Amino acid sequence: QNNPSVDEFLMPGVDSSRIMDDENLFEKIDALFEAIAGGKKRFTYTDFEKYFRKAVVAATPRPPSNQNRSSTRVFIIGPGFGNQINPRQSRMVEAAGYQVGWCFSVPNPEIPNFPVEPYLEQIKSEMDAFRPHVIVGASKGGVYIIGLWRRGYWRGPTVLINAHPTCRQLPQESNVAIAVGSNDEVYPISRHDLEAILNTGGMNKTFLYFTCDSGRLPSGQISRQGDTHNQESLLHHDVLPRLIDSVLCPEGPEMHFIRTWKERLSIERNNAELWLGFSPEQIMRLWSTNGHGQHLFDVHPGTEEYRMVSAVFKALPMEQQAYILSPPETWYPVRALRIQRVENGPQGDASWKPYYKSLVRSLEDQGVDFEAGTHTCWAFHGCNNEALESIINNPLSGFQPLASGSRSTTLWGSGTYFARDAKYVADGGFCGTPDMNGSRRMLMCLLIMGMPCLGDPSHKGVLPFRHKPPHRYHSSVDCLASPEVMVIQQSGAAMPAYVITFA
């Protein structure tokens, strides 16, 4: 009230001079105070700076993750990398724009207990001449990288394709990404054993890029298939170059790889999501009430909010989807007939607000800075009208994850399922019976994902530990390359934001 400049900075476009006479405005400012203070009775300048630094980051598009590839030197152990058996893998790395150095001067270690020690000096000599930022090895060639680690010749960023049987300990100080498929016929290894190997590395310095089969559909088919030894998924969605980029990231390879999921989306969708916001506070700035009373409010056509929600709803990804239930052309004539904003204050107070705060603290305890738009995302949920009304009106929790599944089965484990793309929800028939005019409804939600892991049909509501106890992964997805299905196990992990009626 006393400083118009501070007023405009804190609540842009809002006149706070009548705060004591406007209950709705008071609620908004009180919510902002709580967000800055993090539950404390007062906040310091450090709290203030930390909050708004995150807010600015969340409202600013990140530069492309691949912008430094031309200046990055990648040293590849040739044997095992598949130049002849899998030449597309080699071409992909070179086409990505890196400076690539190949090591073909050492033999292919085909036989068990192959003696690598006599050849490590040769590899080191070539590395010293090339001065790599990253080294990459695959299949049988991985034994050379393990030898370099043991000898102390390399402690820098490393990508291992396939987990060589001799790999049992990772260097604590190195960023390491390991790519493995569940159907590896050469080096079969369980996910549990892989996670144990990754946990020997440094905190936030390791990443397991893993692919596995989904659970069975009622037809007996699977919706996704895990990689074999020659990992096909590395050749799609820019995965192999993204793994190389990830081990160069100061925040760690896992954090980097999750960030790049947004790069699979169209520019239009990214811009629209950025405008809507990636946190409950940012979304609640659009509310017309304090959330008490009725819970659905029309978003008027012609407004910027309507245009942005429509853009996310209509968006298709830049790359081919894994689940193609109908051609993209069938989505073009589909349109939003009505968009309603969900404003449920009691549900927020009891569910997604406290969960959001606890997740931020969980990440901080693990040495991870929370990033809105990385640890949160927009997604869609379909259900029948009765369930939809319950989700938007329940004063305690909108979703009941542990009572949910995907069509009476759990393809990726127990929980509530969401889709990245609205088209998948519509095509899959998840929205119940159409009304007499042929229209249906779906929910557009902000998911508070935290650090997600690959889902598994064996997950029963409890996800694996992330690195070491006590912290577990917060949610799961169907694919680490470019997730199209997200699964939450906690009711507070989803904020129902909009109801979209479409036909």
Image: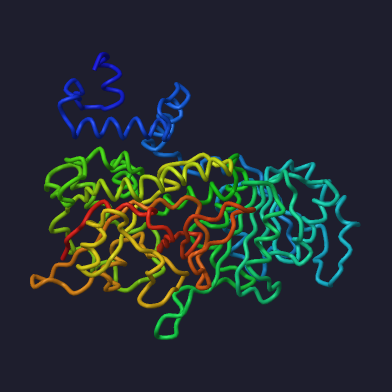
| Count of numbered badges drawn on the protein | 0
Instruction: Write the residue at 89% across / 57% down.
Output: 117
Residues 169 and 266: in front is 169
Give the residue at the far bottom of this rendering: 219
Q: Taking 8 as reference, is 318 above or below it?
A: below
Q: Quadrant of the C terminus?
A: bottom left
Q: Can you give x and y, in whole percent of width and height, for residue 389 in the image?
A: 20, 62
Residues 304 and 371: in front is 371
Where on the picture, by quarter, is residue 49? Answer: top left
Instruction: Write the residue at 79% across / 61% down.
Output: 143
Q: Can you give x and y, in whole percent of width and height, for residue 138 in the image?
A: 69, 62
Left or right of 289? Residue 312 is: right
Give the residue at the far left of this rendering: 437
Which colour scheme appears in the figure? Answer: rainbow
Where on the picture, by quarter, is residue 396? Answer: bottom left
Left or right of 168? Residue 51 is: left
Q: Can you give x and y, in whole percent of width and height, for residue 84 in the image?
A: 67, 68
Q: Taking 194 as reference, is 374 above or below it?
A: above
Residues 404 and 141: in front is 404
Q: Quadrant of the N terminus?
A: top left
Instruction: Write the residue at 32% across / 32% down.
Output: 32
Residues 17 and 222: in front is 17
Where on the picture, by quarter, is residue 208? Answer: bottom right
Left or right of 199? Residue 11 is: left
